[in-house]
Amino acid sequence: MKLDILAFGAHPDDVELGCGATIAKEISLGKKVGVVDLTRGELGTRGSADLRDLESENAAKVLGITVRENLGFADGFFINDRKHQLEIIKMIRKYQPDIVLCNAIDDRHIDHPKGSNLVSDACFLSGLLKIETELEGESQQKWRPKQVFHYIQWKNIKPDFVVDVTGFINVKEKAVLAYSSQFYDPNSNELETPITSKNFIESIKYRAQDLGRLIGVDYAEGFNTERYVAVENLSKLI
């Protein structure tokens, strides 16, 4: 199955928080989008891996993505090595995306930059003919995405470009809140974390509003890129 966009997240909910509105917009434009979670988020303070599995399924339905997979890497302890790269290469060659979205290049959680580098390296390696992979007993063809973009997460990293997501922020918020065990709940007796505050949930909108303000729209999401941003002509800018 060929996808237009394949989004990777170190944990379930990374994709929704980082670029959920952009994904919702691309899907509304007819793009086929898939998500691959590297871990099950089993080290999360609240909830459990089994609950995160269910929540990620519900979030996928909200966004309307075509497919979602979980590679089951060790939360907190996966590394950027041959073993992990090959598993991601298999996903890239399976879905042949034109665009890959992945974790922030720098962030508070150590898994985010690790996941960023791991996926980026695998995207390059996936295009090498002499790296042979098999999936379900069949040899895979080499494939290298045209673009690799990094969504922004906890840290307010300066984006290389921003996407107007006006009209899709509510879809993003609904997808994020599908992870009900992870975020603000005034009735919860579980330990508090940086992402369980009311302010964090509110930041979904106000951070997008601030980026939108800077480009003259209501809401926007920011991305970093490893290559120069190219435009067809000046009139394509907004």
Image: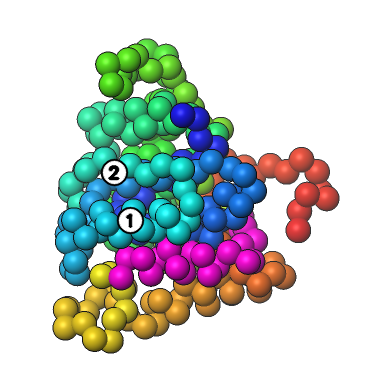
Contact between labelled residues 1 and 2, with CB atoms less than 8 Å apart: yes
Splitting the image into 4 quarters, where does residue 91 fall? top left
Q: Label 1: state its secondary structure.
A: helix
Splitting the image into 4 quarters, where does residue 159 fall? bottom right
Name the residue located 32 percent from the left edge and 65 percent from the top edge: 179
Quadrant that contains the C terminus: bottom right
Which three-letter amino acid code belongs to the residue tagged 2? Asn
Q: Residues within 10 Å of mark 2 (few under 14, many from 20)?
A: some
Task: For residue 193, say whether it is visible.
Answer: yes
Which three-letter amino acid code belongs to the residue tagged 1? Ser
In magenta, the rendered stretch is 161-180
Q: Label 2: state its secondary structure.
A: strand
> Is 203 on the left or on the right of 10, as rendered?
right
Name the residue located 18 percent from the left edge and 46 percent from the top edge: 74
Q: Residues within 10 Å of mark 1 (few under 14, many from 20)?
A: many
Name the residue located 45 percent from the left edge and 68 percent from the top edge: 174
> In the rendered image, which residue does mark 1 sit on?
56
* Front residue of 98 and 124: 98
> Please, which residue is most extreme toward the bottom here?
186
Q: Which mark is residue 221?
A: none
> In the rendered image, which residue does mark 2 sit on?
70
Task: For residue 226, say whether it is visible.
Answer: no
Instruction: Tell which circle, 2 or 1, labels the residue nearer the N-terminal end.
Output: 1
